Amino acid sequence: MGAGHSHDAHDHHHGDAGIRAFAWVTLLNLAYTILEAAYGFATNSLALLSDALHNLGDVLGLALAWGAAVIARRKPTETHTYGWRRATLLSPLANAIVLAGFSGALAWEAVRRFFAPPEVPGTTVMVVAAIGIAVNLGAAWFMHGGHDDLNRRGAFLHLLADAAVSLAAVLAGAGMLVFGWRWLDPLTALLVGAVVAFSAFGLLRDSFNAAMDAVPRQIDQSAVRAFLASCPGVTAVHHLHIWSLGAGEIAMTAHLVRANADDHDVFIDSIAHDLDERFGINHPTLQIEFGSGCHDDHDRAPHY
């Protein structure tokens, strides 16, 4: 029975540019969060305070993502043979939990304030929230282009949501300024909580699945199986497993029954290249078997 692994060289580490992006975005959002919270307390605006609390949650999440990106660069060891790249899967999970907690706190305070909405200066709310739009869109630009990285994708989506929330605060400030509608302040906070909860749910689902070694959402496992089964000389495919190793890195193992062939090394290199090009699977491990004692597990329980 022969065994093989892709011999293609892959860069297992995140580039310095990605880490710098996390650093800049984290520090920029922290500075704005402090500014927004200060004005929120000064004006007694729940819209600003709730958005500042939301931004603080994102700052904590971004800090986790930043730390995970740094930790992921650590080289493999005898005890951590894949290195620490899976830290980029745990960070979004923690981020989503933090966001979900903040959304509940915001909703509770907003409902309480509906009974006695305070007087809030609409102009200040508009100006500070407008700064937030610029900050969040600028920070999202730093995160753009890394959507195969769940870590960066989570940060990007949160920053876009923050920009939308800041826009809602601008509109609320305009309503309070022009019409004197003080109830817009807690209403905006309720909307913030809803936006946070919605974004947290999607990220929580994806990050939990990744942490549980689910097949990445963008990959059709049946298509991968069909591709492997169609390769020259392959008569059966079994023990097929696909999972995420970390940001932008997808692993796969498979047993291929290929009895009448002696070009296994060339075959494995060719298949590894095609798996990367077609499906983005860049860490395949293929085991070649000769067929007599092997059985297809397509209709059986997964083998571990």
Image (cartoon, rainbow, N blue to C red):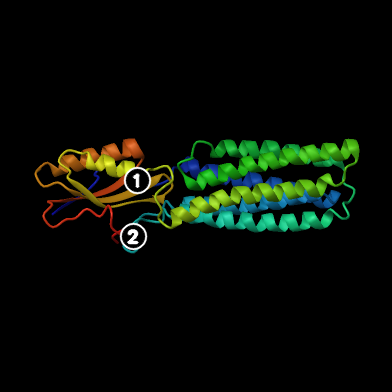
User: Identity of the amino acid at label 1?
Assistant: Gln
Q: Under tag 1, what secondary structure?
A: helix
Percent x, y of residue 23: 56, 46
Query: Farthest residue toward the front?
Result: 299
| Labelled disc at residue 77 | 2
User: Identity of the amino acid at label 2?
Assistant: Thr
Quadrant (top left/top right/bottom left/bottom right) for the N terminus? bottom left
Instruction: Give me the residue at 74% from left, 37% from top.
Output: 130
Q: Under tag 2, what secondary structure?
A: loop
Quadrant (top left/top right/bottom left/bottom right) for the C terminus? bottom left
Instruction: Give me the residue at 73% from left, 38% from top.
Output: 167
167 vs 116, left or right, is left
Q: Nearer the viewer, mark 1 or mark 2?
A: 1
Q: Where 303 falls versus 224 (above or below)?
A: below
Instruction: Give me the residue at 32% from left, 39% from top.
Output: 276
Percent x, y of residue 134: 68, 36
The answer to whether mark 1 and mark 2 are in CB contact below 8 A is no
Query: Circle 1 is placed at which residue position?
Result: 221
